[in-house]
Amino acid sequence: MQSSDVCEHYGMMESDLAEKRRMRKPAELRAVTGWLATELNSATLSEVANRFGRDIATLSGAVRRVRERAQEESEYREGLNKLENKALRTRAKKETGHGAGI
């Protein structure tokens, strides 16, 4: 799962994503992590939701909003594209044995 890439991109700790408090930034990062996982076929939304102790329906709606926002805002879409490219590079390094685990 690319949560470490997402956290690094947004400057947050991965542990922040699993906090029980309802804060906007961690919720957005969970949604982006869910979006990225489904885009790269690296995890299901159920797996992402379970990892962060969240409800699948809530995460699914949040991922839908990420997709909608990306369609509406080119700058946001560009950020997601950069993040996706970074995650692909990370995965390639791991597959060739040149990277650390997630």
Image (tube, helix red, strand yellow):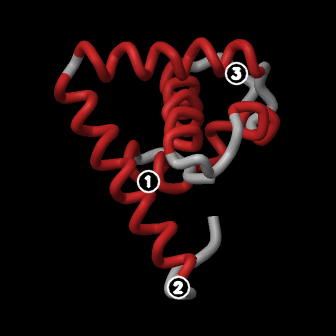
In front: mark 1 or mark 3? 1
Taking the view exactly as shown, the residue that stands out farthest to the bottom is 97
Circles 1 and 3 in contact, beta carbons < 8 Å: no
Of labels 2 and 3, earlier in sequence is 3
Residue visible at 55% across and 28% down in the picture: 31
Task: Give the labeled residue for mark 2.
Answer: 96
x and y, in percent, of residue 93 in the image: 47, 78
Residue 21's label in the rendered image is 3
Measured in 3D between alpha carbons, the distance from the residue under mark 1 to the one under mark 3, in whole angstroms, is 21 Å
Mark 1: which secondary structure?
helix
Q: Amino acid at mark 2?
A: Thr
How many residues crowd mark 2 within 10 Å: few (<14), some (14–19), many (20+)? few
Camera-nearest label, 2 or 3 = 2
Residue 101 at x, y percent in the picture: 63, 72
Amino acid type, residue under disc 3 in the picture: Arg
- Binning the other alpha carbons within 10 Å of mark 3 as few (below 14), some (14 to 19) or many (20 upward) gives few
Marks 2/1: CA–CA distance:
22 Å
Percent across and percent down for residue 44 are: 70, 38
Q: Which residue occupies 18% across, 29% down?
A: 75
The residue positioned 28% from the left and 48% from the top of the image is 82
User: What residue sits right under mark 1 in the picture?
Assistant: 8
- What residue is drawn where x is 34% and y is 16%? 69
Q: Tell me which label, 1 or 3, sits earlier in the chain.
A: 1
Disc 2 from disc 3: Cα separation:
38 Å
Q: Is residue 89 left or right of residue 34?
A: left
Q: Amino acid at mark 1?
A: Glu
| CB atoms of marks 2 and 3 within 8 Å | no
Q: Quadrant of residue 95?
A: bottom right
Query: Which quadrant of the figure contains the C terminus?
Result: bottom right
Q: Considering the numbered disc 3 on the image, is that residue within a helix, a strand or a loop? A: loop
Is tag 2's residue or tag 1's residue first in the polypeptide sequence?
A: 1
